[in-house]
Image: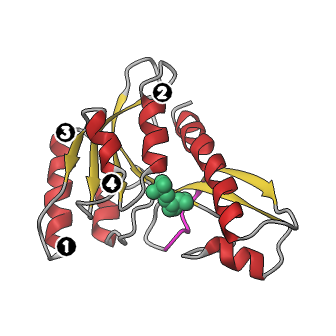
Amino acid sequence: MKKFSGKKVCAAVFISGRGSNLKSLINFSKTKISPIKIEIVFSNNKSAFGLKFAKEKKIEIIHLNEKNFNILEQKLAKILNERKIELICLAGFMKILSNSFIKKFNGKIINIHPSLLPKYKGLNTHRRVIENKEDYTGCTVHFVNSKLDSGKIILQKKIKIFKKDNEKTLAQRVLTEEHKIYPKAIIRLFS
Ligand code: GRF
């Protein structure tokens, strides 16, 4: 990415649910040190809780009523191009993007995942980490490529797992770190 010179790049965030990372990204994007401004929030789920915060902050929300996901992606790509979106941040986006969409925005899509990738790709990471009696877990911000949770890593944060941790407490502790690491990873991308 081009080095941040003070002129913010247009970004979009894709979500499907709660949107706590979206909230942290929106708050970050309003600061002077942020290289991005969030122009668009896209959700495949029009009742995603996270959309409330985007609405409050008067950020445009895109929801496309289209059952065929390929057609939906084509419509979405057109909007993103028209709006000169240069970074797409996935934040709890539960749909798998097609290879052709990923190719169109090659190197411009990033994601946050609640594990120390390449370990624990996919869902239910905290449960699996505890079942396997791991000592450490964490979160990862990475580029999106055609393989699930496999693109180049931008930044990771490692945390210790305590004996008293369960799936819920671990998820909460990792999430707190996610909210810090996603903005940091974006700063790194533009430095
Ligand atoms: C986060 O744990 C993120 O790492 C994962 O999905 C969850 C989304 O949470 N990809 P939220 O919607 O940002 O609160």
Question: Label 1 amino acid?
Answer: Asn
Residues tagged 2 and 1 counted as in contact (Cβ below 8 A): no
Give me the residue at 49% from left, 40% from top. 24
Residue identifier under label 4? 105
Q: Residues within 10 Å of mark 2 (few under 14, many from 20)?
A: many
Q: Is mark 3 within 8 Å of ligand 1?
A: no
Magenta stretch, main secondary structure, is: loop
- Residue 65, above or below 52: below
Of marks 1 and 4, the one in the foreground? 1
Secondary structure category for the residue under label 1? helix
Q: Which residue is mark 3?
A: 83
Q: Which mark is residue 179?
A: none
- Of the residues shown, which amino acid type is indicated by label 4? Phe
Mark toward the start of the polypeptide (2 vs 4): 2
**Separation (CA) of disc 3 from disc 2:** 19 Å
**For marks 3 and 2 on the same chain, the one whose residue lies earlier in the sequence:** 2
Q: Earlier in the sequence, mark 2 or mark 1?
A: 2
Label 4 environment density (alpha carbons within 10 Å; few <14, some 14–19, many ≥20): some
Say which of 40 and 175 sits in front: 175
Q: Which residue is mark 2?
A: 34
Check whether the beta carbons of the residues at disc 3 and disc 2 lie within 8 A of each other.
no
**Which residue is pictured at 15% across the width and 52% down the height?**
78
> Is residue 149 located in the magenta-colored stretch of the structure?
yes
